[in-house]
Image: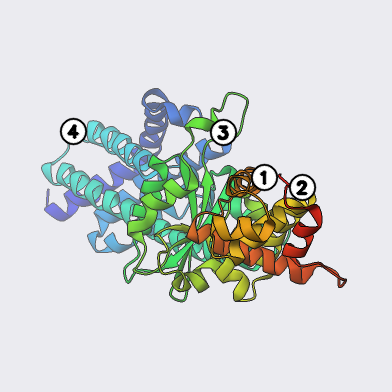
Amino acid sequence: MTPAKSKEQTLSWLRAISGELATATLKRLDETLPWYGDMPPGRRSAVGLVAQAGITSFISWYDDPSTTPWIAADVFGVAPRELLRSVSLQQTLQLIRVVVEVVEERVNDSPYELREAVLLYSREIAFSAADVYARAAEARGLWDARLEALVVDSILSGEYDNELPSRIAALGWNGHGEVSVLVGTAPRMLDVDQLRRTARHLDADLLIGVQGNRLVVVIGRAQPASEERDDSQLVAFIDIARQLEPSFGEGYLVLGPEVDGLVDASKSAKAALAGFAVARAWRNAQRPTHADDLLPERALAGDPIARSALVGRIYRPLKNHSTELLTTLWCYLDNGRSLEATARELFVHPNTVRYRLKRISEVIGWDATGSREALILQTALVLGSIAEPDGPRAEPGKRAAQRGPSGRG
């Protein structure tokens, strides 16, 4: 028998038993791979088509080894596109191994050339499978990056549409409940994977976007709110920001206020962006710093959110609680934070001023005796006074005098 005749006979034999090999392969898959048995009938059928196509492709390749570049298209082209998303690369390699084992067992007594061909083909098909998944992953990664950038842009602009929830779900967002936005300078080489790894260790999830030289990170808690959740053990957003800080470029890093959910993330983003724009005006700004710690600079730059926050959190609560405390704060700040000068203007004892300053701190949460907080409070008083409706207003000293020299708060 000539070698050519022998190969023709081998090919005829392989074609004759191809159906038998496919049946044996499906039976082996059901016996050895639990995930195959758990699949819906439609996907089981698709996996069977892939296995059968692999056997048919091997016979064609054995007939003409120059067809190697087309193996992946031949084998995986018969499967629906969703199969690549539902079957992992590891499962695909397990499938290839079962097919090869069944074929090897059947051709064990065949010529050496055929057994060697099976080994060579299994190597080629494994590399082809890896290439298919690598291309799919690359395409999915590029698509995810574009989709993530679109979602972050929507958050920054505050322009939401009905498709935003589905886009967020498509990205696999695991955040639950509270959200905060971190804005800083983008590094030359952004390591997105490192950012995500750091966040996972802190039970957080991220949405990442680069806009020009700015890196915007939306931080969400990965632990859902529930009755069993112990909020005291949750990592604070500022602590998460400190852990993410090395992944940002040089410059200022500003964390927006905590909001209830991703739908409200634009509020945090706008505050963070406004703070990032003016952070250089605070010489001692930390990295990272809260956007609310930059309220005076933001207000001076024309940020309406900061102006409203200063008036709403400081001026109005203090005025509604006690005009006497408001007057004391005005005097204390106008007199360079001097207890004695304030006491003389108000005709009270310095201890009375101390008591009132303590009450002020209890009411609004800011301590006027600190230099930075004094700036915040004085800016709030100025803005609140400007926002007041026009009308006669007595000077602090005169109103204090009307109460008499012995008045105490």
Residue at x 49% of width, y 47% of height: 237
The residue identified by callout 1 is 363
Q: As drawn, is 56 to the left or to the right of 176?
A: left
> Counting other residues with Cα less than 10 Å from the Cα at mark 4, is it few (<14), some (14-19), or many (20 or more)?
few
Residue 321: image tag:
2
Gap in angstroms between the C-alphas marked 1 and 4: 87 Å
Measure how far apart labels 4 and 2 are at the Cα level. Answer: 93 Å
The residue type indicated by label 1 comes to Val
Disc 4 secondary structure class: loop
Q: Amino acid at mark 3?
A: Pro
Is disc 1 placed on a helix, strand or loop?
helix
Scheme by which the image is coloured: rainbow
Disc 2 residue type (three-letter): His
Q: Earlier in the sequence, mark 3 or mark 4?
A: 3
Mark nearer the viewer, 3 or 4: 3
Secondary-structure class at tag 2: helix
Q: Amino acid at mark 4?
A: Asn
Left or right for 244, reference 318: left
Q: Residue at x 47, y 73 (%)?
A: 281
